[in-house]
Image (cartoon, helix red, strand yellow):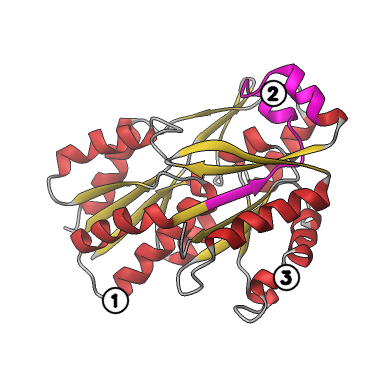
Amino acid sequence: MIKILIDTASDITMQEAQELGINAIPIEVRFGNESFLDGFNLSHKKFFEKLIESDDFPQTSQINEFRFEEEFKKLTKNGDEVICITLSSKLSGTYNCALAASKSFQDKVFVVDSLNATIGERILCELALRLIKEGKTAKEIVEQLNKQKQRIKLLAVLDTLKYLKKGGRISPLVALTGEVFSIKPVVSVVDGEVKLVGKAIGSKKGNNLLMQFVEKCGIDFDMPFALAYSGLNEDFLNRYLIDSKKIWNGNVEMKDIPSYMIGSTIGTHVGPGAIAVSFFAKEC
């Protein structure tokens, strides 16, 4: 039997993992002296409530080698094989810890660096599940994941620069300028790293710019795809769906577009009001 293990930077909660028939290993999140496990004893909604209300800026910790080793022991004890999918190695040391832990399990554990995060990591997991159902071996699946992950695009428009400033990702001056002029940055995961790919003034233009990037690459609707939002309500997501309806028309019913709430690992840096799209690109 082939089992999937994924970290919660994918924004797959423990409940969702059970429904999908996979295993999730949570990333630790700290608010001051309080420590939580993402998606386990800290829901995505509760995280954003704390993010908005707390004076403490949250800190996340990579999953260490010992925790991976414990999971691998449990999952392989009946002779099963494990494919472990992790957050991009360029965003966290989690992948390296998983890889180091896997060395004690010979050919039973395979570790895949998603080179992505949140729904970009999620759709790679969904592809793995599809390949398991097709009867592929673990080695064949890993080979396909490493090949197909190069096609994954993760694009997002952010509502505010405040949390990037708090996390030290941008200067206070840049953040202040962005807030004054209502600049909505569009970011993408490129070669495993988060890059600024565009800026727009106001939400409407931000959504349009995001839509332009998506259209440029083209969504392969035969492969997994997903949308995500951050914060306590879906207003920004619903607005984006209205603005981008020409992308979906003729390809998928609007009610069937999969969407998820962003959790603490990425939510720490983007704050509420972000919209993300991830898909396997046809071209770019």
What amino acid type is highlighted by mark number 3?
Lys
What amino acid type is highlighted by mark number 1?
Glu
What amino acid type is highlighted by mark number 2?
Lys
Question: At which x and y percent is residue 281?
Answer: 48, 61
Please indicate, yes or no, whether residue 12 appears anywhere in the rendered image. no
Choose mark 3 or mark 1, whichever is in front.
3
Badge 1 density bin: few <14, some 14–19, many ≥20, Cα 10 Å: few
Which numbered disc, 1 or 2, marks the residue that appears first in the sequence?
A: 1
Vertical side of 153 occupied by 184: above or below = above
User: Where does label 1 land, which residue?
Assistant: 134
Question: At which x and y percent is residue 209?
Answer: 70, 51
User: Where does label 2 land, which residue?
Assistant: 165
Vertical side of 150 occupied by 253: above or below = below
For the residues marked 1 and 2, what is the alpha-carbon distance in whole angstroms?
45 Å
User: Where does label 3 land, which residue?
Assistant: 245
Choose mark 3 or mark 2, whichever is in front.
3
Q: Which type of secondary structure does the marked residue at label 3 adopt? A: helix
Find residue 223 and report its image quarter.
bottom left
* Nearer the observer, 112 or 54: 112
Q: Which type of secondary structure does the marked residue at label 1 adopt? A: loop
Vertical side of 78 occupied by 206: above or below = above
Badge 3 density bin: few <14, some 14–19, many ≥20, Cα 10 Å: few
Residue range of the region highlighted in magenta in the rendering: 154-178
Please indicate, yes or no, whether residue 34 appears anywhere in the rendered image. yes
Q: How many numbered callouts?
A: 3
Which numbered disc, 3 or 1, marks the residue that appears first in the sequence?
A: 1
Choose mark 1 or mark 2, whichever is in front.
2
* Nearer the observer, 74 or 195: 195
Q: Residue at x 26, y 38 (%)?
A: 99
